[in-house]
Image (cartoon, grey):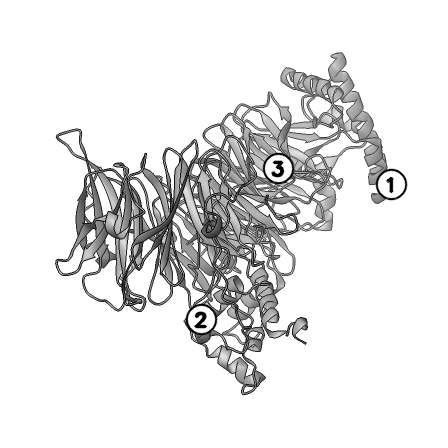
C-alpha cells in the first residue's frame, strides 16, 4: 500500500460507528460521501475540481437533516439514487431518541428524498424533506437492495428497497408506496424468504445479484456468531439453498464478492472498440464470502455457489488483541487478483494477498491509520476512474489516493495487454 | 483546505514549560545525525536521539534559547544554551583522538594547535570535576552536573556533552540565531532580548589564556577556551517577535527583526577589515559606536489587515526556492517592467492573528488569513522538491504547511501546543534524516511526527497518457492521429469508465 498517498483527512467531533459511512453516486458520475457521527452531525464530502490549477479541492460540509431532535443519536445511514440518469436521491437515517417522560427509547427510520426532480443535486433540499417511519425495535444495519419483479422472463420492475436489521432478531424491508408517498414495511417472508428469525440480531448483511438478476445470494452474520448464506431465485421468490454455520463470537462483517467482475457487454461496447476485446467465454461466476469475526482471524469461504460454506480458508492471524471491524475486497494493486483488506480497532489495516504459486493467502502488509477503523470503502470520489480508499476511523475520514505515476504505469501495462497480440494466436 | 492525518510518531516524556525558542533539531554531537534538544523553565535540557533520551543536563536556570551551530567557528557544532537570567552555556562532546586528527587535516596549523590544546583542557576539566580539587570556582550546581555526566560516560561508551564555556550576558534573552550576519565568513551569535534590544556576539578563542584569562575576566566566566565578545547592540522601537537571518540576491546578509503589527526592522551590518581587527579587543564592551558600518531600516508591509499595532509577529528569512519556482516568481513579478530582474529570496511573516504572508523584496507575494492564533513559524522542505515550505503552528495545534505558491495542507494535533519546531531528525544513525514536526504539549510530552508523507501539496485527478490510450482505438478505419483525436474528444464519463475498465477489469 506504499503507492497510496494521503489525500485528505477530516476530523469528526464525535465518533461514528460501522454503519455511518455511505456513498452516493450522482447522475453525472461523481460520487459523494456521507458520514454521520453519534452526536447528530452529518457531513457531506466531495472533491471539487479547481479549474485554475487543475487540482482537486476537498470540500466538507455539515448538513443539518430535519427531524433529528437534539439528544437523538444516529445509528445507521444509507443512501441510493433511484434513477441512473437523474438525481433522485433517497437517504435513510435511523435514529434513537431518548424520550423525556419515560425511560423508553423511541427509534425511527427517517427517509429523506428530493421533492421534485431537480436537475442539479442539492443536499440541503433533500435534508429538509423527510418521511418518518416509527420503529418498534432498535435498528442495526441499514442498507438497500433491488426488489425485482419478473413477468414472463422479463424484469417488470427493479425497485430499490431499504433493508434494516433490528434488535427483534428480524430483518425488515421498507419500500416506497408511491401513490401514498409513504414508506411501508414489506412483509419480508414473501419477497425475501431468506430473512427469517435469527437467534440474535443481524449485524451485517451483504447481498449480491448474479446471473442477470435471476438469482440473489444473501449472506448475513449475527451477534452470536451465526452466519447464514442463502440463494433465492428472484423469479419465483423461492429459496434455492440455505447454509448456515456458527462461530463463537460477534460477527462484524460479511462480504460477498465475485472473483472476477464482469462488465455489461452493452456498456463495454460504448467505451471500448469491440475489435480489441478478445472473445470472452461466459464463465460461471465464482462468488466468495469473507466473514469477519470480531476477535478471530477472518475466514474466506471460496466459491460459495458450488461449495456452500464447506470450502473455506482462515486468513493468517496477526495480533491477538485486536478487534476486526470491517472488510473490503478489491484489486488495489491492479494485478487482476483481488486483495482482502481488513480494518481493525488497533489502528491498522491488514492487507491479505493471494499467492498464486503457493495457492494461499498471506498477510502482505500492515497499514497504520491514525485512529481505530470503523469502516472502509474503495470508490472513485475524485471522478477520474481511479478508485480511492476511504477509511472511516473513530477520529474522522481518511482518503487515500493512488499515486498517479504508478497508475500511469499500470494503465500502460493494461493497454499493452490489449493492443499487443497474444503470441498464442500467431 | 486539504488536511492530512499523521501516523508515524514518537512520544517522549518531558516536564516543565518550554519557551518558544528552547527547542531545536540539530547535530549536536557531530556524528552526522540530527538530534532533538529541549530545555524547560526548571533548567533541564534533554537531548533525544532516535527513540530515546540520551542525555539530560540539569541545574541550569530558566532556559529560553537553545541553538546548535558552529558558534566557535571550528567546523563543528556546539550546543548553545541561554537562560532567562543571563547565562550563556556552550556544551560540546569531548573530542576523540580520531576526530581530532580528522579535523586537523582540514584546518590550518594555527587552529590545529588550538584544537590540541582544547582537547587537553577538556580532559583536565572533567578530571577536575571528579577529583573536586578544582582551582576554578565553578558554581556548585555545575560541578554536580559534570560529575553526573562523567559517571554516565564511564557507564556506556556514548559520548555525552560537557559544558565547555559559561558566560554572563545581559538577561532576558528570548531569541537566538547563529549565523554569519556580517558577511565575514564567521558565525556570530545574535540574541534578541525582551527589552527590545538585539545584540550580536562573536566567539573569540584565546590560545594564551593564562594571561588574558586571569586578568580580564572574572573567574566564574570563561572557563577555558575563550569568550563571546559583544559586537553590536541595536535597540528596536517595539517588542521583538522573532529575529531571522536573511540574504539578498547578491548574498548580503541582514538581520530581520519582527516588530508588532506585521512590520519588521532590517539590520544590515558589514564587517570591514579594520573593524574586524579591533573588534576582538576593544569593542567588547560597547559596540554601538558612530562608526557602525551598516544600516537600519523599518519596513511596514502594506497590508491593511495588519494595522493592529500590538499583534506580535514572527518572521523567517532565507526561504530556499527551487530553480523552477524561482523563475516563476521572477517572471511573475517582472511582468510590468518587461525585464527579468534578479529577485531576492522570499521571506515569510506571520502574525498572531493568523495572517501568513510571503514577501519578496518587500512586496507581498501573497497573504492568507487563518482562524487560529499562529505563534510559530518555521521552514522545512517537506515535499522534497527543493524549495522550502512554510510551516506555521497555532496554539491549539493547527499546523499549516504552505508552499511558496500558496498551496496549503493542514494538520491538526488536537491538543494545545506549548512550543513547536520542524526540521530534520534521524531515527537511525545510518539512515538519512527524515522530516519531522516537533510539538511540546501541555501534558508534559514531546511529540515528534516523523517522515511526513507529503509529496505534493495539491491533489490532482489522474490524467491518463492520451497517446497511450489512443493505441486502443487504432483500427482499420482509424489511423493514429484520428485515434488520438477521438480520445481527446472523449467525454468525461466515457473516459472515466474506460480507465476504470482498463484498471480493474482487464486481466494481466
Q: Can you say whether A234 is above or below B83 in the image?
A: below
| Relative image position of residue B390 (x, y in whole percent) | 52, 51
Report the residue at 64% width, 15% height from top. B140
Indicate the quadrant containing the C terminus of chain B: top left, top right, bottom left or bottom right: bottom right
Q: Is residue A162 left or right of residue B116?
A: left
Please tell me which residue is depicted at 53% across the width and 23% down the height of the picture.
B42
Considering the numbered disc 2 on the image, is that residue within a helix, a strand or a loop?
Answer: helix
Describe residue A125's horizontal placement relative to residue A242 as left or right.
left
From the image, state whether disc 3 or disc 1 is nearer to you: 3
Q: What secondary structure is marked by label 3?
A: strand
- The residue indicated by pointer 1 is B109
Q: Chain of mark 1?
A: B
Picture coordinates of residue A408 (x, y %)?
A: 57, 65
The residue that label 3 is drawn on is: B67
Compute the Cα span from label 1 to label 2. Answer: 83 Å
Q: Quadrant of residue A210?
A: bottom left
Residue A394 visible (yes or no): no
Residue placed farthest to the bottom in the image?
Answer: B477
Chain ID, mark 3: B
Q: Secondary structure at mark 1?
A: helix
Q: Compared to A116, does B354 lie above or below? A: above
Compute the Cα span from label 3 to label 1.
Answer: 29 Å
Chain letter for the residue marked with disc 2 in the picture: A
Amino acid at each position: 500500500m506504499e503507492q497510496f498517498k494521503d489525500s485528505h483527512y477530516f476530523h469528526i467531533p464525535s465518533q461514528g460507528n460501522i454503519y455511518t459511512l455511505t456513498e452516493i453516486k450522482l447522475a453525472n458520475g461523481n460520487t459523494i460521501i456521507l458520514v454521520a457521527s453519534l452526536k447528530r452531525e452529518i457531513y457531506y464530502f466531495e472533491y471539487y475540481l479547481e479549474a485554475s490549477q487543475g487540482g482537486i479541492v476537498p470540500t466538507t460540509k455539515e448538513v443539518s437533516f430535519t427531524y433529528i431532535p437534539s439528544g437523538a443519536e444516529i445509528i445507521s445511514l444509507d443512501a441510493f439514487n433511484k434513477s441512473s440518469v437523474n438525481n433522485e436521491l433517497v437517504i435513510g437515517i435511523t435514529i434513537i431518541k431518548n424520550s423525556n417522560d419515560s425511560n423508553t427509547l423511541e427509534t425511527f427510520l427517517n427517509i429523506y428524498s428530493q421533492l421534485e426532480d431537480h436537475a442539479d443535486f442539492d443536499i440541503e433540499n433533500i435534508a429538509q424533506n423527510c418521511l418518518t417511519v416509527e420503529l418498534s425495535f432498535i435498528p442495526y444495519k441499514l442498507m438497500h437492495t433491488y426488489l425485482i419483479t419478473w413477468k414472463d422472463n422479463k424484469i417488470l420492475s427493479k425497485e430499490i428497497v431499504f433493508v434494516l436489521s433490528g434488535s427483534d432478531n428480524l430483518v425488515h424491508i421498507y419500500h416506497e408506496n408511491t401513490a401514498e408517498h409513504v414508506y411501508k414495511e414489506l412483509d419480508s417472508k414473501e419477497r425475501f424468504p431468506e430473512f427469517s428469525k435469527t437467534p440474535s440480531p443481524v449485524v451485517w448483511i451483504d447481498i449480491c445479484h448474479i446471473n442477470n438478476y435471476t438469482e440473489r445470494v444473501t449472506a448475513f452474520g449475527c451477534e452470536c456468531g451465526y452466519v447464514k448464506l442463502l440463494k433465492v431465485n428472484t423469479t419465483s421468490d423461492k429459496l434455492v439453498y440455505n447454509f448456515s454455520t456458527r462461530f463463537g463470537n460477534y460477527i462484524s462483517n460479511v462480504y460477498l464478492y465475485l472473483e472476477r467482475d464482469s462488465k455489461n457487454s452493452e456498456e463495454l461496447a460504448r467505451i471500448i472498440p469491440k475489435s480489441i476485446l478478445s472473445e470472452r467465454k461466459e464463465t460461471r461466476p465464482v462468488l466468495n464470502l469473507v466473514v469477519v469475526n470480531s476477535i478471530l482471524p477472518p475466514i474466506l469461504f471460496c466459491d460459495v455457489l458450488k461449495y456452500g460454506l464447506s470450502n473455506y480458508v482462515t486468513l493468517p492471524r496477526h495480533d491477538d488483541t485486536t478487534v476486526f471491524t470491517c472488510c473490503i475486497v478489491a484489486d488495489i494493486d491492479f494485478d487482476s487478483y483481488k486483495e482482502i483488506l481488513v480494518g481493525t480497532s488497533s489502528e491498522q489495516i491488514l492487507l491479505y494477498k493471494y499467492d498464486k504459486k503457493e495457492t494461499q493467502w498471506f498477510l502482505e502488509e500492515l497499514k497504520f491509520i491514525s485512529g481505530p477503523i470503523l469502516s472502509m470503502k474503495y470508490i472513485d470520489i475524485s471522478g477520474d476512474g481511479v478508485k480511492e480508499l476511504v477509511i472511516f476511523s473513530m477520529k474522522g475520514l481518511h482518503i487515500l489516493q493512488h499515486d498517479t505515476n504508478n497508475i500511469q504505469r499500470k494503465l500502460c501495462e493494461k493497454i499493452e495487454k490489449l493492443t499487443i497480440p497474444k503470441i498464442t494466436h500467431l | 483546505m486539504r488536511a492530512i492525518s499523521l501516523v508515524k510518531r514518537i512520544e517522549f516524556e518531558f516536564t516543565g514549560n518550554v519557551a518558544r525558542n528552547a527547542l531545536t533539531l540539530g547535530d549536536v554531537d557531530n556524528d552526522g545525525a540530527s538530534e532533538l534538544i529541549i530545555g524547560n523553565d526548571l533548567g533541564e535540557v534533554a537531548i533525544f536521539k532516535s527513540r530515546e533520551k540520551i542525555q539530560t543536563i540539569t541545574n541550569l536556570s530558566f532556559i529560553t534559547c537553545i541553538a546548535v551551530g558552529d558558534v566557535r567557528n571550528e567546523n563543528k557544532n556546539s550546543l548553545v544554551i541561554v537562560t532567562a537570567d543571563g547565562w550563556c552555556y556552550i556544551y560540546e562532546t569531548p573530542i576523540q583522538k580520531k576526530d581530532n586528527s580528522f579535523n586537523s587535516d582540514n584546518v590550518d596549523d594555527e587552529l590545529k594547535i588550538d584544537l590540541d590544546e582544547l582537547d587537553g583542557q577538556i580532559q583536565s576539566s572533567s578530571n577536575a570535576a571528579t577529583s573536586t580539587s578544582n582551582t576554578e570556582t565553578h558554581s556548585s550546581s555545575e560541578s554536580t552536573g559534570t560529575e553526573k555526566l562523567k559517571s554516565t560516560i564511564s557507564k556506556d561508551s556514548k559520548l555525552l556533552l560537557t559544558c565547555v564555556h559559561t558566560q554572563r550576558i545581559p538577561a532576558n534573552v528570548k531569541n537566538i540565531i547563529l549565523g554569519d550576519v556580517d558577511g565575514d565568513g564567521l558565525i556570530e551569535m545574535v540574541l534578541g532580548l525582551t527589552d527590545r534590544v538585539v545584540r550580536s556576539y562573536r566567539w573569540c578563542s584565546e590560545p594564551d589564556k593564562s594571561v588574558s584569562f586571569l586578568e580580564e575576566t572574572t573567574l566564574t566566566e570563561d572557563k577555558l577556551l575563550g569568550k563571546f565578545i559583544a559586537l553590536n547592540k541595536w535597540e528596536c522601537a517595539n517588542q521583538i517577535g522573532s529575529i531571522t537571518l536573511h540574504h539578498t540576491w547578491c548574498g548580503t546578509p541582514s538581520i530581520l527583526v519582527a516588530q508588532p503589527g506585521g512590520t519588521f526592522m532590517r539590520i544590515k551590518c558589514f564587517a570591514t577589515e579594520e573593524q574586524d581587527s579591533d573588534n576582538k579587543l576593544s569593542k567588547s564592551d560597547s559596540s554601538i559606536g558612530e562608526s557602525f558600518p551598516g544600516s537600519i531600516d523599518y519596513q511596514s508591509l502594506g497590508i491593511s489587515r495588519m494595522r493592529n499595532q500590538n499583534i506580535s509577529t514572527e518572521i523567517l528569512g532565507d526561504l530556499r526556492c527551487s530553480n523552477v519556482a524561482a523563475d516563476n516568481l521572477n517572471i511573475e513579478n517582472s511582468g510590468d517592467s518587461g525585464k527579468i530582474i534578479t529577485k531576492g529570496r522570499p521571506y515569510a511573516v506571520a502574525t498572531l492573528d493568523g495572517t501568513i504572508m510571503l514577501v519578496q523584496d518587500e512586496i507581498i507575494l501573497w497573504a492568507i488569513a487563518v482562524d487560529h492564533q499562529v505563534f510559530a513559524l518555521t521552514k522545512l522542505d517537506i515535499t522534497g522538491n527543493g524549495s522550502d515550505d512554510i510551516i506555521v503552528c497555532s496554539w491549539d495545534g493547527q499546523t499549516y504547511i504552505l508552499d511558496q505558491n500558496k498551496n496549503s495542507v493542514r494538520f491538526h494535533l488536537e491538543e494545545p501546543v506549548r512550543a513547536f519546531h520542524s526540521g530534520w531528525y534521524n531515527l537511525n544513525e545510518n539512515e538519512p534524516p527524515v522530516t519531522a514536526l516537533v510539538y511540546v504539549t501541555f501534558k508534559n510530552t514531546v511529540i515528534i511526527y516523523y517522515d511526513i508523507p507529503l509529496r505534493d501539496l495539491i491533489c490532482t485527478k489522474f490524467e491518463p497518457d492520451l497517446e497511450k490510450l489512443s493505441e486502443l482505438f487504432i483500427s482499420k478505419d482509424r489511423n493514429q492521429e484520428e485515434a488520438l483525436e477521438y480520445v481527446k474528444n472523449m467525454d468525461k464519463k466515457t473516459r472515466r469508465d474506460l480507465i476504470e475498465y482498463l484498471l480493474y477489469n482487464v486481466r494481466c
